[in-house]
Image (cartoon, rainbow, N blue to C red):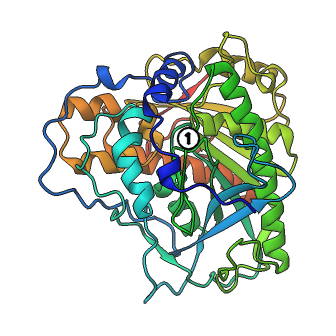
């Protein structure tokens, strides 16, 4: 097996990547649709990096977490064909009842955090966060590493989380942890060499490849993500049957074997991750329900993607930001051609990043109000977080657990910021 190359062999492609990624952002909305040069000034760097905290999950369970290093030996890495295997890092979040005494799962590992601070936040995500302002590695999560899985009489439904282009898998930890606290097993996936940085257990760091033409890059990325998603589902099947697929042989948490209900699988994602949710559902019938959070379904040339042209037969929810957006043509085509259940929601006062941890983390950095408005809109951060959690959990509760609720039937006075789109 060929390991991911160390950071010294990977970092240093910033200028070429930034130019192409920015061009894709303006046309595709796969990256945050704003250039760093257009972002409002956020002030001088802080004397000491801020140690931020994620919101506390709202479910009845504490949350456990374990990372897995997976290798698909059936294919070479599509981004680096000289590598014998396709290697991925995933995190598994799950309900536990015994978190006490366990170390808290890190938000980012040290080298990944350093790369995120020096390159990703500004140049990939289009945010104006001064370098050194945030201590990303010390951000407080609410997941206990390696805690045993909570006992249950039935297997637990499984959810997959797909981050956006230029986003690490940790960028959705708030929503992921909340779902785990409600009893789901949630698996977050870094798509190596498309994710901005992936740190492996040996300390090596794989960073994003330099895109060529945006259209070809997006098409290739989606094809690779579809294969990665199916591979991860295969590995989860191995876990549930008692085999440990971790390349490095690290132990699985007690109770994980036998608890995964792979007949009830959902998927959700932000930006390109939302797009990948639709394409992965189209490619793999094991995924029963999906949510696209502000991800485009339109090709670079303005035509609908294939999944938008023929739709899906399984339930699908579209959650979009407020104001002008370029998701419209693809989403309209998808809804027109989808025979299965579908809804479109709009989060009032939100921006593209309001569906990610940016909504809760950026306000803790002392940034100027105009900068926060540019990055996460005008909606109150707590309202955005709790509204997103409510609708995502209601969707999966209905379609994977058979829980009948009314939140998806129409506007709710409990969540006035969520608008239903006809």
Q: Secondary structure at mark 1?
A: loop
Instruction: Residue 392 in the image: state x and y as whole percent.
Output: 58, 48
Q: Nearer the viewer, residue 304 or 380?
A: 304
Instruction: Give the image quarter of residue 195.
Output: top right
Q: Residue at x 62, y 82 (%)?
A: 150
Describe residue 173's horizontal placement relative to residue 49 as left or right.
Answer: right
61 vs 386: above or below: below
The image shows a total of numbered marks equal to 1
Kindly identify which residue carries mark 1.
Answer: 208
Q: Is residue 405 visible?
A: no
The C terminus - image quarter: top right
60 vs 347: above or below: below
Instruction: Residue 341 in the image: state x and y as whole percent.
Output: 77, 36
The N terminus - image quarter: bottom right
Q: Nearer the viewer, residue 37 or 316?
A: 37
Q: Residue at x 51, y 67 (%)?
A: 59
Q: Residue at x 75, y 76 (%)?
A: 259
Instruction: Residue 132 in the image: state x and y as whole percent.
Output: 24, 50
Describe residue 77's horizontal placement relative to residue 74 as left or right.
Answer: left
285 vs 126: above or below: below
Instruction: Residue 82 in the image: state x and y as whole percent.
Output: 75, 46
Q: Residue at x 66, y 37 (%)?
A: 317
Q: Residues within 10 Å of mark 1 (few under 14, many from 20)?
A: many
293 vs 103: above or below: above
């Amino acid at each position: 097996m060929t390991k991911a190359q160390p950071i010294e062999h990977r970092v240093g492609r910033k200028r070429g990547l930034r130019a192409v990624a920015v061009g894709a952002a303006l046309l595709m909305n796969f990256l945050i649709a704003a250039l760093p040069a257009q972002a409002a000034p956020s002030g001088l760097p802080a004397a000491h990096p801020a140690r931020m905290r994620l919101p506390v999950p709202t479910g009845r369970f504490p949350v456990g977490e374990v990372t897995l290093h997976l290798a698909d030996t059936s294919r070479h890495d599509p981004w680096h064909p000289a590598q014998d295997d396709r290697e991925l890092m995933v995190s598994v979040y799950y309900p536990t009842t015994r978190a006490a005494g366990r170390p808290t799962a890190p938000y980012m590992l040290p080298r990944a955090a350093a790369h995120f601070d020096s390159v990703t936040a500004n140049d990939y995500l289009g945010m104006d966060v001064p370098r050194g302002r945030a201590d990303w590695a010390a951000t407080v999560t609410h997941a206990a590493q390696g805690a045993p899985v909570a006992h249950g009489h039935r297997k637990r439904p499984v959810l997959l989380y797909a981050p956006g282009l230029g986003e690490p898998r940790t960028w959705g930890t708030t929503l992921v942890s909340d779902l785990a606290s409600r009893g789901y097993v949630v698996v977050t996936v870094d798509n190596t060499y498309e994710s901005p940085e992936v740190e492996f257990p040996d300390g090596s760091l794989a960073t994003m490849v330099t895109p060529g033409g945006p259209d070809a890059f997006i098409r290739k990325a989606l094809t690779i993500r579809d294969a990665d998603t199916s591979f991860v589902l295969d590995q989860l099947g191995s876990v549930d049957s008692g085999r440990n697929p971790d390349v490095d042989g690290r132990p699985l948490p007690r109770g994980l074997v036998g608890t995964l209900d792979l007949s009830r699988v959902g998927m959700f994602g932000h930006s390109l991750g939302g797009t990948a949710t639709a394409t992965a559902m189209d490619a793999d019938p094991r995924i029963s329900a999906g949510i696209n959070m502000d991800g485009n379904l339109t090709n670079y040339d303005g035509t609908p993607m294939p999944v938008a042209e023929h739709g899906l037969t399984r339930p699908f929810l579209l959650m979009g930001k407020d104001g002008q957006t370029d998701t419209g043509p693809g989403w309209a085509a998808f809804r027109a051609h989808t025979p299965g259940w579908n809804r479109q929601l709009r989060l009032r006062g939100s921006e593209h990043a309001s569906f990610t941890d940016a909504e809760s983390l950026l306000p803790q950095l002392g940034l100027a109000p105009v900068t926060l408005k540019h990055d996460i809109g005008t909606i109150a951060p707590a309202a955005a977080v709790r509204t997103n959690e409510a609708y995502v959990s209601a969707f999966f509760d209905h379609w994977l657990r058979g829980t009948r609720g009314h939140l998806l039937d129409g506007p709710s006075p409990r969540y006035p910021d969520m608008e239903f789109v006809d």
